[in-house]
Amino acid sequence: MAIVEKLVKNQILGMANKTLASELGTTEANICRDLKLLESRQWVEKAPDGRWRLTPKFGGFSGQIIKSFQVAKLRLTEDEARYASEMQ
């Protein structure tokens, strides 16, 4: 998760394995292993210059969270209206 947090802050330029390892205080082997796992979930991708960045799929999670809140608000509004109509 620390890799994702670093990549969020460096989305435009991306980050190299070596830089990630250095900033996170771990080995490049660990970073490579973790990036492969994230890549298998399509959360990260390697840019043409070899740096890693988050994918549009990962960015889409924020939109899905907002939609969930919108659905919840709509349901609450509907329930409120139903209860309010019964109170009159």
Image (cartoon, rainbow, N blue to C red):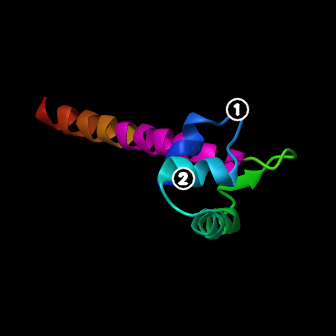
Residue carrying label 1:
12
Label 2 neighbour load within 10 Å: few <14, some 14-19, many 20+: some
Task: Using residue 21 as the reference point, say whether residue 52 is left or right of it.
Answer: right
From this view, report whether residue 40 is shown above or below residue 43: below
- The magenta stretch spans residue 53: yes
* Secondary structure under the numbered disc 2 in the rendered image: helix
Q: Amino acid at mark 1?
A: Ile
Which corner quadrant of the image does residue 9 belong to? top right
Residue 19 appears in the rendering = yes
* Secondary structure under the numbered disc 1 in the rendered image: loop
Please name the residue shown 48% across and 38% down the image.
Answer: 66
- Residue 52 rendering spot, x and y as whole percentages: 71, 49
Please name the residue shown 19% across and 39% down the image.
Answer: 83
Q: Main secondary structure of the magenta part?
A: helix
- The magenta stretch spans residue 40: no
Q: Which residues are magenta?
A: 52-73
Q: Nearer the viewer, residue 42 or 9?
A: 9
The residue positioned farthest toward the right in the image shown: 48
Q: Nearer the viewer, residue 29 or 74?
A: 29
The label number, if any, that marks residue 3 in the structure image = 2
Q: Nearer the viewer, residue 63 or 31?
A: 31
The label number, if any, that marks residue 54 in the structure image = none
